[in-house]
Amino acid sequence: MKKQLFALAFMGLFACKSDNTTSVTPDNTTTTSDVDISVVQSKFSNSGLSVTVEGNYLVIKSNGIPNHKSPYFQSTDARYEAYNGINTRFNLNPNRISSQNLVFKIPLHPAKASTHASTPLGPIGVSLNGVPFFNQYAGPNQPLTNEINSFDQYLGHPQQTGQYHYHQEPAYLTTQNGKSAFLGFLLDGFPVYGPQENGKAVSNADLDTYHGHSHVTAEFPKGIYHYHITDADPYINGSGFYGTAGTVSQ
């Protein structure tokens, strides 16, 4: 019976839930350090991935290799899988996935920034399998209009150095964990959730300028500001970080 209760409790940790009667404001929310860090750490799962606490930071070290197959592995690699997605305009780019040395330092005490810095090109956060999140641009102020056609069946692709990343929903993770799942963090320490909430799709109109909102979630029962992935630009993040970004080295 105890094992069953534990299993149910663990499954419940993957849902992003909102309730108007328990909503909170961004300035009165739980911070990452207010929850059981071991629970947060346990969500990150992949080989070549480590998650530790160092001072005021959650430190995530990753080789950036996704835990799913892709046409961007070399064709001789067992992880290679030909494109089998729904985009009839898919066009394989010339890059191939290669191992990275990514170190993300995520603040344990995220707070609203007085000045909201723009998200940079390159990693703006990290997903639960150690794959970086990128923003909504293919290059400086260049929309993803054409680059989207190079996203594989799990909606990721590698850039010139072989760094695989997601600009949009990490489809493998949402297939495994659910559309409302906790999916990782942006560099400012605020969590990222999937494209659904309470069984309904989240739209850009439901979110603020920075592509988030604040309320109770399963992982943050006192409430926290969090981002949601949507199916329209900017997909993961809007006009900059809500909080003050930590660092990423690569």
Image (cartoon, rainbow, N blue to C red):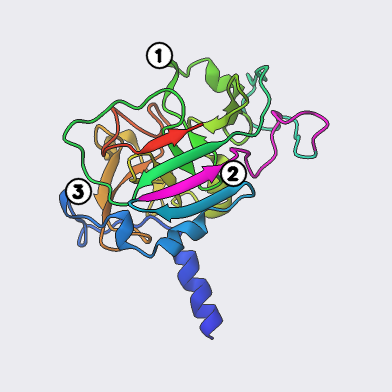
- Picture coordinates of residue 243 (x, y %)? 26, 39
At label 1, counting other C-alpha atoms closer than 10 Å, the crowd grade (few under 14, some 14-19, many 20 or more) is few
Q: Which residue bears the numbered disc 3? A: 26
Magenta portion: prevailing SS class: loop
**Vertical placement of residue 51 versus 104, above or below:** below
Q: Which residue bears the numbered disc 2? A: 172
- Picture coordinates of residue 241 (x, y %)? 29, 34
Q: Which residue bears the numbered disc 1? A: 140
| Residue under the point 63% across and 33% down | 153
Residue closest to the far front: 55
As for residue 67 lying within the magenta part, the answer is yes
Q: Earlier in the sequence, mark 2 or mark 1?
A: 1
Q: What stretch is highlighted in magenta?
A: 57-77
In front of the other: label 3 or label 2? 3
**Vertical placement of residue 138 versus 165, above or below:** above
Label 3 element class: helix
Label 1 element class: loop
Residues under labels 2 and 1: Cα distance?
A: 28 Å
**Vertical placement of residue 18 versus 185, above or below:** below
Residues under labels 3 and 2: Cα distance?
A: 30 Å
At label 3, counting other C-alpha atoms closer than 10 Å, the crowd grade (few under 14, some 14-19, many 20 or more) is some
| Residue under the point 20% across and 62% down | 21
Q: Are marks 2 and 1 in contact (CB under 8 Å)?
A: no
| Residue under the point 61% across and 26% down | 87
Label 2 element class: helix
**Amino acid under label 1?**
Pro
